[in-house]
Image: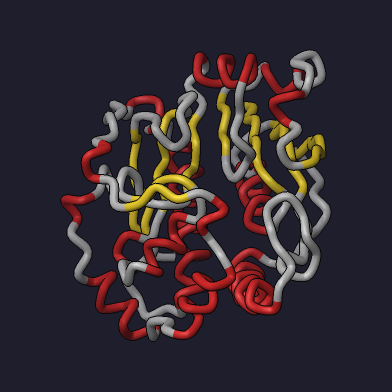
Amino acid sequence: MNVTLFSSNQPRHLALAETLAEISEKVYYVEECQTFFPGRFEDDLFRVSPVMQDYMYKVLCAEREVFGVPRFLGGRVEHLALKVNELSNLDMDVLAPALQSDVYIVFGASYIKGPLADFLVRHRAINIHMGVSPYYRGSSCNFWAMYDNRPELVGATIHLLSKGLDSGAILFHALPAAVASDPFLLGMNAVKSAHNAVVNYLKGSQIGTMAPVTQDKRLEIRYTRHFDFTDGVAAEYLARLLSPEEVAVSLRERNQDMFIRPYIDHH
């Protein structure tokens, strides 16, 4: 089995490429690059400010605890590096070797449009959306679930890629284990759960047999854009972080009926 992954360059994205390589003959990794120092250096996604640096430092510490540090990839992974938002402008001929795979996965890539989007939709590509749709859609969904004091709605939605943002039919939800956890670590554990679920289901061939479930947009709690995440919002959130014990209580009280085929990671 060959897999093509459209993703980013942070440790959590590298980790998925490495894990997919364990069950694949080859992984084509199309990597959109962001700064490794958000909050300190400005790029297309992150502003430079003291509060953003404080917030992102906590994110990076949690990410490195779960997924390690930036690193070289080798073995069965072949990768092509691009700047963020360049993917949809790339000539399809450049991507030709990566468009002969058995499985296509999108995780943390920019919004894909044009001929590439058409190709991926046609080939039933799956998108790993970090957030529990249809409740939270758009940008930084797990942050907004925590901002709303809803740790039970921190997780991932694995759905068929569509031309609408995070609107494709859902295959299943992936959720972190119901244990006491720092809020930042909770978000990374949700990512790890998504990785484990996708890899386990690909290895067992279950994903191809799952009947997609159309999203009920009437259940939406928030639809957020990147610009909604301001310094003021980040500062307010940092000032009232939930304790690990409060997080655990919320996770233990999750209503399983809110999720589709929930995969709960116990690693």
Residue at (60, 74) in percent of width and height: 55
Q: Quick one: 202 or 155, which is closer to the camera?
A: 155
* Percent x, y of residue 211: 28, 26
Tell me which corner region of the image, top left, top right, bottom left or bottom right, holds residue 176: bottom left
Residue at (45, 75) in percent of width and height: 183
Q: Is residue 222 above or below residue 212?
A: below
257 relative position to 227: left or right: left
Screen quadrant of the C terminus? bottom left
Q: Is residue 210 above or below residue 10?
A: above
Residue at (44, 37) in percent of width and height: 166
Q: Is residue 128 above or below residue 1?
A: below
Tell me which corner region of the image, top left, top right, bottom left or bottom right, holds residue 95: top right
* Percent x, y of residue 5: 64, 35
Which of the colour schemes (rainbow, by chain, secondary structure, one colour) is used? secondary structure
The count of marks equals 0
Screen quadrant of the N terminus? top right
Q: Quick one: 243 or 22, which is closer to the camera?
A: 243
Q: Is residue 236 above or below residue 46?
A: below
Q: Quick one: 117 or 234, which is closer to the camera?
A: 234
* Percent x, y of residue 60: 66, 70
* Percent x, y of residue 100: 67, 16
